[in-house]
Amino acid sequence: KRLQNIRELKKNGQLNIQAVIKLLWVMRDDKEIVANLSDLLTSEGSSKSVFDGIEFYLPQLVHMMIHLDDTWEFPVLEQFVYMVAQHSMHFALQLHWYVIGYMQEHKPEAEVGKKNKKSDDTLFKKAARIINNLEIVITYGNPDSVALEQRY
């Protein structure tokens, strides 16, 4: 039944990105649903309206990436945003800035050597790993990225 609801997110040929992002958050503990929603976004991502929606909801996607359970063998949401980053340098830079923001917020030390009251080692390390992976993805890129940048 839940998979039926996922299919209903696309009506009249348009994908409701707001509903997809909301469902991603509500069902964040269900790996199958998150994987199916990521697949849906991937399959529809070549549409300009869907790409614009993904970009609009990037802060929410980053929040989910940072806070979702790190015990997943295959972080589907991370893989999705890396794939989008390969297709758009603009998206990749925005993603980079948001994740750097998480690193700054949760770093162990504040300025002048004092302990950061919002320090969270787990979130800091996860953000650092995402930045590292993002840099690798951008470096190797996608052969179609120039054409896609011009398109969008």
Image: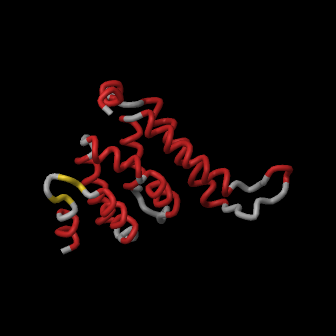
Q: Residue at x 40, y 46 (%)?
A: 55
46, 11: nearer the viewer: 11
Q: Residue at x 39, y 55 (%)?
A: 77
Total marks placed: 0
Residue 126 sits in quarter: bottom right
**How far across and down, in percent of the image, does residue 118 sit?**
70, 63
**How far across and down, in percent of the image, does residue 56 sit?**
41, 50
Q: Residue furthest bottom?
A: 1
Q: Residue at x 36, y 61 (%)?
A: 21
Question: In the image, 74: left or right of 4?
Answer: right
Query: Coloring scheme of the render?
Result: secondary structure
Residue 27 sits in quarter: bottom left
Image quadrant for the N terminus?
bottom left
134, 70: nearer the viewer: 134
75, 15: nearer the viewer: 15
Image quadrant for the C terminus?
top left
Residue 19 sits in quarter: bottom left
Q: Residue at x 45, y 35 (%)?
A: 90
Q: Residue furthest left?
A: 12
**How far across and down, in percent of the image, does residue 140 sit?**
43, 30
